[in-house]
Image (cartoon, rainbow, N blue to C red):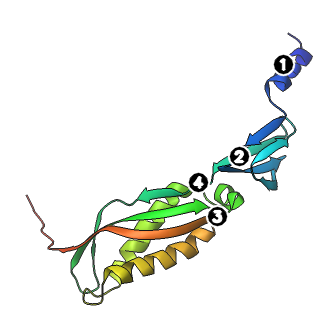
């Protein structure tokens, strides 16, 4: 099989267009460089030279794993939370972070733990923790092209720390 036949076959199997659905955005790269962000619709592209990375922009809800954190006053607090967010900037979500969903979960877990660790138990309320974590997450997530729309706690309890040594 000649090189021309292989090249022709390859070009015929790579479509010169992309269709972006209403619940998607996409980032168009030409020769490995950012060209533009695409909204829903039909778009032409140069096969092989252009790449289009699609991203889902529907609202997503993520649960945070339960964790036990020691407060500033030394009490053990068990918490778990829930984040609601959506992609607001497809370019940032694709180019600025490896896995925005996993990264946001990890970041939220760290922010939640650090907020509890720097707060006295007497001053710690549900509303205070939610407001602090929500504000920090919203600011941090903007660099990743994410808009955090809400944060809540599923579990928020003070519990005694028991260590079993065998």
Mark 4 element type: loop
Quadrant location of residue 75? bottom left
Check the picture and name the quadrant holding the N terminus.
top right
How far apart marks 4 and 2 lie (CA) works out to: 16 Å
Residue visible at 84% across and 19% down? 9
Which x, y percent locates residue 144?
A: 62, 64
Q: Residue furthest front?
A: 22
Q: Residue furthest left?
A: 166
Mark 1 element type: helix
Q: Residue furthest right?
A: 4
Mark 3 element type: loop
The residue identified by callout 4 is 58
Residue visible at 70% across and 44% down? 21
Residue 81 falls left or right of residue 40: left
Q: Residues within 10 Å of mark 1 (few under 14, many from 20)?
A: few
Name the disc covering residue 9, or none: 1
Quadrant location of residue 64? bottom left
Q: Residue furthest top?
A: 1
Check the picture and name the quadrant holding the C terminus.
bottom left
How far apart marks 1 and 2 lie (CA) works out to: 23 Å
Residue 60 falls left or right of residue 82: right
The residue identified by callout 2 is 53
Residue 148 falls left or right of residue 9: left
Q: Are marks 3 and 4 in contact (CB under 8 Å)?
A: no
């Amino acid at each position: 099989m000649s090189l021309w036949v292989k090249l022709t076959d390859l070009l015929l199997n790579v479509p010169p267009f992309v269709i972006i659905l209403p619940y998607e955005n996409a980032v168009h790269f030409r020769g490995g460089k950012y060209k533009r962000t695409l909204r829903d619709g039909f778009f032409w592209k140069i096969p092989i030279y252009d790449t289009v990375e699609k991203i889902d922009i529907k609202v997503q809800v993520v649960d945070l794993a339960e964790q036990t954190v020691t407060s500033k006053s030394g009490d053990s607090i068990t918490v778990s939370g829930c984040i609601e967010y959506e992609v607001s900037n497809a370019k940032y979500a694709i180019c600025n972070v490896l896995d925005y969903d996993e990264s946001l979960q990890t970041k939220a877990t760290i922010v939640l733990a650090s907020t509890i660790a720097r707060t006295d138990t007497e001053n710690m309320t549900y509303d205070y923790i939610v407001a602090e974590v929500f504000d920090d997450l919203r600011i941090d997530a903007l660099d990743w092209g994410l808009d955090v729309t809400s944060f809540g706690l599923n579990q928020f309890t003070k519990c005694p720390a028991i260590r079993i040594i065998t």
